[in-house]
């Protein structure tokens, strides 16, 4: 099995875990604040990874200055994508957030072109168009409830900046992917994020620590899921796939989250799965298959022509 196919299978597993992210947040939202929901799982993932990364750091002969790039990536990318998305959603509507997130692959493609010199070929444009139609069908209710009026302008702006930060982070990590292991990239990003988020947790949600003994079963399931799957395993797999695929391909694959998230919400939360959502999910899957098979073959031909 080729590296690209394995990478796509890994990416599918990542999107499966990310799709469960929304359900996990729903499970914890009654007892856990938004900042603590982000900070605590990242802190635990950082602690889990620390012994392995410290060992590799000493063996690899790296110096402290070699990890400064992650301060930039976290401060300009991961931090705004997490914090501004939280703030933005508070000042806007969930439906607005769902629609604005559709711009992520487009912005990622722009950054990939500017920083990595990647290009959107015809196959990728076709795949992108199919995915947009599919996600639109999946998000019919969000589109109907969408309100971009001036009273939500601040929230929408914050959400959009968060999306830009997310795109920048993904492309920036792709640029340095060959210099660091997957474990190092996750650890150093989370280390900076934990430091940046700590003051916000202590200031806005100091009571969160006292509530831990009172967590319900659903809250524990949600927090464990966020720690082990969303912040730990999925990110390790994501960076592994990022090393073998273009940043643009990885970004377009994010539309799978909607396709996978719908049945998870239907099964776990009892939400209704509508016909147009099922059709939309099939289109998103078709878009992913086009990227997996057709675009990969096209890229291989280019490599053979220009070795």
Image (spheres, rainbow, N blue to C red):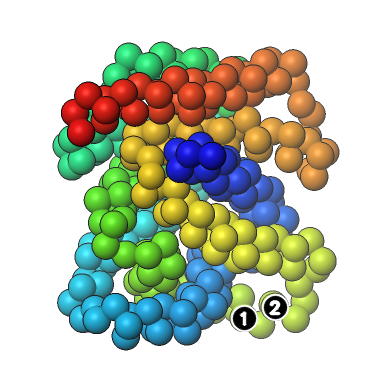
* Whether residue 76 is visible: no
Disc 1 to disc 2: CB gap under 8 Å: yes
Q: Which residue is mark 1?
A: 209
Q: Is residue 50 left or right of residue 272?
A: left
| Residue 123 - label | none
Characterize the local packing of mark 2: few (<14), some (14-19) or many (20 or more) Cα atoms within 10 angstroms: few
Q: Quadrant of the N terminus?
A: top right
Q: Nearer the viewer, residue 47 or 33?
A: 47
Look at the numbered disc 1 and give the secondary structure of its residue: helix
Q: Nearer the viewer, residue 148 or 253?
A: 253
Is 215 placed above or below 234 here?
A: below
Q: Is residue 186 left or right of residue 271?
A: left
Say which residue appears at 29% left-offset and 46% top-offset: 171
Q: Nearer the viewer, residue 58 or 48?
A: 58
* Whether residue 16 is visible: yes
Q: Which residue is mark 2?
A: 212
Q: Quadrant of the C terminus?
A: top left
Say which residue appears at 66% left-offset and 37% top-offset: 261
Residue 274 image offset from top left, x and y in percent:
75, 20
Total count of labels: 2
Q: Nearer the viewer, residue 223 or 96?
A: 223
Residue 4 image offset from top left, x and y in percent:
45, 38
Q: Is residue 293 left or right of residue 110?
A: right
Say which residue appears at 29% left-offset and 78% top-offset: 60
Q: Quadrant of residue 67?
A: bottom left
Residue 243 image offset from top left, x and y in percent:
36, 49
Residue 298 image offset from top left, x and y in percent:
35, 22
Question: Alpha-carbon distance for marks 1 and 2?
Answer: 6 Å
Say which residue appears at 36% left-offset and 57% top-offset: 78
Look at the numbered disc 2 and give the secondary structure of its residue: helix
């Amino acid at each position: 099995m080729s590296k690209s196919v394995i990478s796509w299978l890994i990416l599918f597993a990542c999107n499966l875990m990310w799709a469960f992210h929304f359900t996990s947040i729903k499970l914890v939202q009654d007892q856990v604040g938004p900042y603590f929901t982000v900070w605590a799982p990242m802190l635990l993932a950082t602690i889990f990874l620390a012994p392995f990364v410290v060992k590799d750091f000493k063996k690899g002969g790296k110096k402290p200055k070699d990890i400064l790039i992650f301060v930039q990536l976290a401060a300009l990318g991961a931090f705004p994508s997490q914090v501004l998305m939280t703030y933005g959603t508070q000042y806007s509507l969930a439906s607005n957030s769902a629609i604005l997130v559709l711009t992520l692959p487009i912005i990622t493609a722009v950054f990939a072109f500017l920083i990595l010199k990647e290009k959107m070929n015809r196959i990728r444009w076709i795949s992108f168009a199919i995915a947009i139609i599919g996600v639109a069908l999946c998000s019919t209710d969000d589109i109907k409830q969408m309100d971009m009026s001036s009273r939500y302008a601040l929230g929408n702006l914050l959400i959009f900046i968060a999306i830009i930060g997310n795109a920048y982070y993904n492309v920036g990590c792709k640029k340095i992917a060959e210099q660091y292991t997957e474990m190092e990239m996750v650890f150093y990003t989370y280390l900076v994020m934990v430091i940046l988020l700590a003051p916000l947790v202590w200031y806005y949600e100091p009571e969160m620590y006292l509530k831990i003994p009172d967590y319900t079963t659903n809250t524990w399931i949600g927090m464990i899921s966020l720690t082990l799957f969303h912040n730990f395993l999925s990110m390790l797999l994501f960076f592994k796939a990022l090393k073998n695929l273009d940043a643009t391909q990885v970004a377009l694959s994010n539309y799978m989250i909607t396709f996978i998230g719908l049945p998870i919400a239907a099964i776990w939360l009892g939400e209704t799965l509508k016909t147009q959502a099922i059709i939309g999910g099939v289109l998103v899957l078709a878009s992913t298959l086009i990227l997996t098979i057709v675009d990969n073959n096209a890229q291989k031909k280019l490599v053979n022509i220009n070795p």
